[in-house]
Amino acid sequence: MYGIDDGMDGMKMRALEVRDLSVRYGNVTVLEGISMDVEQGDLLGILGPNGAGKTTLFNSILMLQEHEGTVGIFGYTNSARRSMLPFIGYLPQRFSIDQNFPATVDDLISTGLVSLKYMQRSAHLLERNGYRWDYDPGMSNRERMDEALRMVGLEHARRKRLGMLSGGELQRALIAKILVSRPLMLILDEPFTALDQDAQARLLNILKVLNEEMGVTIIVAAHDLMLLMKLAKSIACIDRRLFFHGSKDECIATDLMKVYSEHAMHMHMREHADMNVNMRMSRMMDVDVDAADRVGRYEGSKEVSKEGRHRP
Amino acid sequence: MSMLDILAYTFMQKALIAGVAIGASCSMLGLFLVLRRYSLFGDALSHVALSGIAIGIFLNVYPLWSAMLTSVASSIGITRLRQSTRIQGDALIAVLLITGVASAVLLISASGGFKVDLFSYLFGSITLMSSEDTLMAVVASIAIIAAVMVLKDRLFYMALDERQARISGVNVTLLNYVFMMMASIMVIVAMRLVGILLVSSLIVLPNVAAMMLGRGFRATLLISSCISVASVIAGIITAYYLNVATSGMIVMICVGVMLSIMAARRFKIPIARAV
């Protein structure tokens, strides 16, 4: 086990604290008043439709996005949490690579060793707050890379170019890159999208092993409630606001599945209605909807840069 | 005249020593520029350096120093602009290039038109390099190669995914400044070899060729340096025998190597991706 221990008194320690987190682009509110705690060793599934703000929430936690409110990671809040970021393995929603980019699976995984160096530098700060990180200092870099590749079952592909991997293989290579530094927390943004059934089952298994056997705290975003119910210990449901956060049992008791299905249906219809209106308007005004949307976002984002916000 | 006779000339010795050093450093740093889609950054910086040279000639100071100052200042400015605005990288390069040429034209006209000195910077003059120039080129190249070797993992991580590198703890903002300053110094040094107009060739061509051959990052870095150094040596010697411009010959050999590799891959000759 290389995860973090419970506190000395047996109480669960918090890996992540979010208080009143809001993100606004001008007049558009993307996230509003999100507050939640994630205990160490938890496997939290974050559920929400497209555009609900899941990626924005992750970007805010990871200091890639300006936001209001407080975020704490392993006891360090706001800008002080930067030193804790290397302890988080992040799998983005999209990772595209040019087919000609000269990098093999081994090259990708070796970037995880860069994180390891920064983690070693910040380990004493982590211990100061009562957390423990067992990274096995006696292991060589090659052994770490081999271990990570073995965990995701990619030993055979280490010399393959990234551009030649299938979607599932690339996903596993990215996870191996994260695992090589033995992070304490994983944040995975819709990792199941674009994976077939077999690849999904394999990823589910890897995440369960990491959480249950190695004690890694995992936060995973997805659209599919059924999938999250198979995997997660607790569920949070967001759609700009947090409208549910509880254990899996509480999720079943509150009939979240029914609520979410209705909500998802409502969102789906709203998105389509918006799309139809936009298309009709664009025909009338002869403008490019995407371009107008981009300009809108750009104009909005300029207004966010005010004092008192946490800049990335 | 045999090869050994050529090597007996001091100007050829200096040209080969400086050429090998410049070729290796340009291709190594150039790989990161190419991977980050900044292939034309060297071109833009060299045009800014032209205005620096014009300032030097105008003020009667050593033009390479004024060119280096202008180039480093521009690289810092462009990095700042890139981080604080949403202007695309290629548009910023275009702005830099245009500004460099326009200010150079103004300064040249103010100083009474073109002079012979300026032509040696435009088209390169490695065989006319002084001992001081050679020493400067070698020292700067060694410094750039050493810096690349120390920073290569972090630079590669940034080229692969800048956001991930930032999360992992890499000081991306600082490293961007350091990288751009290194690139601007490299451009000034390479200017003596191939000239302002062809400076980006040593950054782009060996790397495009190496990316077709090397499977991984380290192999690509090594192949690129070998192609660059071999092209520079072959270019200098061939140009001497044929009595043609050295810079043009070096670049045409680089182009030839690249086209040969493309043809080998097209006709499935088994040299492709051997490393």
Image: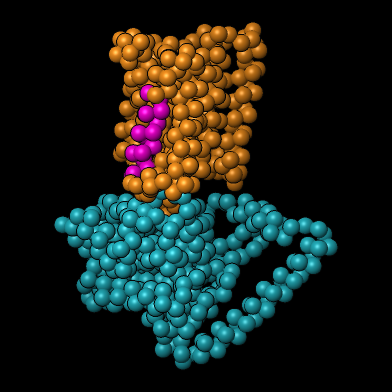
Chain colours: A cyan, B orange
Please tell me whether residue A216 is drawn above or below residue B51 in the rendered image.
below
Q: Quadrant of the N terminus of chain A?
A: bottom left
Residue drawn at x 33%, y 32% as measured from the top left: B145
Q: Is residue B215 visible?
A: yes
Q: Most prominent secondary structure in the magenta stretch?
A: helix
Locate residue A145 relative to residue A224 in the image: left or right.
left
Locate residue B8 relative to residue A246 in the image: left or right.
left
Q: Position of residue B241 (x, y in %)?
A: 42, 14
Q: Is residue A60 visible?
A: no
The tally of labels here is 0
Q: Residue furthest right?
A: A284
Foreground residue, A309 or B187? Answer: B187
Q: Position of residue A10 (x, y in %)?
A: 24, 77
Q: Position of residue A268 (x, y in %)?
A: 64, 77
Say if the magenta span includes residue A137.
no
Foreground residue, B3 or B74? Answer: B3
Say if the magenta span includes residue B223.
yes
Span colored in magenta = B218-233
Please tell me whether residue A77 is drawn above or below residue B37 in the rendered image.
below
Residue drawn at x 82%, y 59% as measured from the top left: A285
Q: Position of residue B266 (x, y in %)?
A: 48, 47
Locate residue B264 relative to residue A259 in the image: left or right.
left
Quadrant of res B12: top left
Residue drawn at x 49%, y 10% as measured from the top left: B61
Residue drawn at x 55%, y 8% as measured from the top left: B116
Please tell me whether residue A213 is drawn above or below residue A58 in the rendered image.
below
Quadrant of res A288: bottom right
